[in-house]
Amino acid sequence: MYRWIVIACLAGVTLACSSPSDNTDSTPEKKVENVWQGQVDTLEKARGVEQTLMDAQKKRDEAMRRQE
C-alpha cells in the first residue's frame, strides 16, 4: 500500500512539473524572451553606439592624415 502511495505521489509531481506547452507542433515559432531581455537589448544598443563612434573616429583619423 505504501509503495502505491509513493508511486502516485511521484507521478503527480511529475505531471505537475511538466509544462503544458510541450507540444510545439501546433504552436508557431516565436521569439523566446528571458528575464534578462531588457539588459540584452540595452547591450545590443550600446554595441551599435560603440560601432558608430568607432566609425566616426576612423573618419577623423583619415581626414587628419590627408591634411598632413
Image (cartoon, helix red, strand yellow):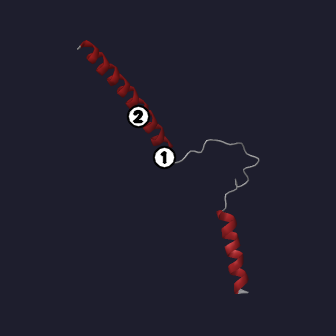
Disc 1 secondary structure class: loop
Q: Is residue 58 left or right of residue 14?
A: left
Q: Position of residue 42 (x, y in %)?
A: 44, 37
For the N terminus, the image quarter is bottom right
Near mark 1 (Cα within 10 A), the count class, few <14, some 14-19 or many ≥20, is: few
* Outermost residue, top side: 67
Residue 62 in the image, given as x and y percentages of width and height = 31, 19
For disc 2, the marked residue is 46
Asked if 63 appears above or below 39 in the picture, the reply is above
> Would residue 52 be found to the left or right of residue 4 on screen?
left
Where residue 47 sits, quadrant-wise, is: top left
The residue drawn where x is 47% and y is 41% is: 40
Residue type, label 1: Trp
Image quarter (top left, top right, bottom left or bottom right) of the C terminus:
top left
Q: Secondary structure at mark 2?
A: helix
Q: Which amino acid type is shown beneath numbered disc 2?
A: Ala
Q: Nearer the viewer, residue 58 or 29?
A: 58
Q: Tell me, for residue 49, which label it has, or none.
A: none
Q: Residue 39, how many percent across, how many down?
A: 45, 42
Disc assigned to residue 36: 1
For marks 1 and 2, the one nearer the N-term is 1
Cα–Cα gap, marks 1 and 2: 15 Å
Mark 2 Cα within 10 Å, few/some/many (few <14, many 20+)?
A: few
Taking the spot 72% from the left edge, 76% from the top edge, the residue there is 8
Quarter-of-image position of residue 32: top right
